[in-house]
Image: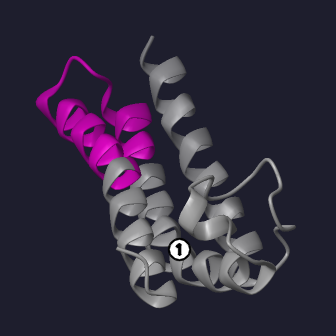
Amino acid sequence: MDVVVGSMWVGVGVGWLVLAWLGSQGRLRFESIWGIRSAWARRSPEVWAEAHRELAVGVGVGGGVTILGGLVILVAGLDDWIGTVGFLVAVAGSVGGQFVGTRRAKAAVGST
């Protein structure tokens, strides 16, 4: 079970890193299936690109933290308190990265 949970969080973190890299390089096509699906981000291709460049910072850091938490789970297991901390770090990295990235993106494009 620990291997499954730890591997899942590592995979989620890698997914966030890939999304962050694609966004920072401007490789996410306008209104593609990946990316911010809010109306404020889909106003124009320019707003879409700028929002995803700003989103990349928070999501990239959050992805790295999520991977770190997943690796702690893989090493320590969920039965140990260190594994529980790793789980909390993974969740916080995933949620926090999205929160910070979205706030940065909204600020960059002037949306409230």
Picture quarter containing residue 2?
top left
Q: In which quarter of the image is the C terminus?
A: bottom left
Query: Which span of residues is magenta-colored?
Result: 69-94
Q: Is residue 106 magenta?
A: no
Instruction: Work out whether residue 111 or residue 14 is closer to the camera in this orientation and state it.
Output: 111
Picture quarter containing residue 75?
top left
Instruction: Work out whether residue 35 or residue 59 is closer to the camera in this orientation and state it.
Output: 35
In the image, 108: left or right of 96?
Answer: right
What is the chief secondary structure element of the magenta stretch?
A: helix
The x, y position of residue 47, in whole percent, is 66, 82
Residue drawn at (79%, 79%) of the image:
45
The x, y position of residue 108, in whole percent, is 47, 89
Q: Quadrant of the N terminus?
A: top left
Picture quarter containing residue 97?
bottom left
Secondary structure found at label 1? helix
- 50 lies above or below 42: below
Instruction: Work out whether residue 68 or residue 28 is closer to the camera in this orientation and state it.
Output: 28
Q: Residue furthest top?
A: 1
Residue drawn at (64%, 86%) of the image:
50
Q: Does the magenta stretch include residue 74?
A: yes
- 80 lies above or below 87: above
The x, y position of residue 18, in whole percent, is 71, 61
- 24 lies above or below 103: below
Amino acid carrying mark 1 in the image: Leu
Residue drawn at (55%, 30%) of the image:
8
- Assess disc 1: are there few (<14), some (14-19) or many (≥20) residues with their C-alpha within 10 Å of its C-alpha: many
Instruction: Work out whether residue 33 or residue 43 is closer to the camera in this orientation and state it.
Output: 43
In the image, 97: left or right of 29?
Answer: left
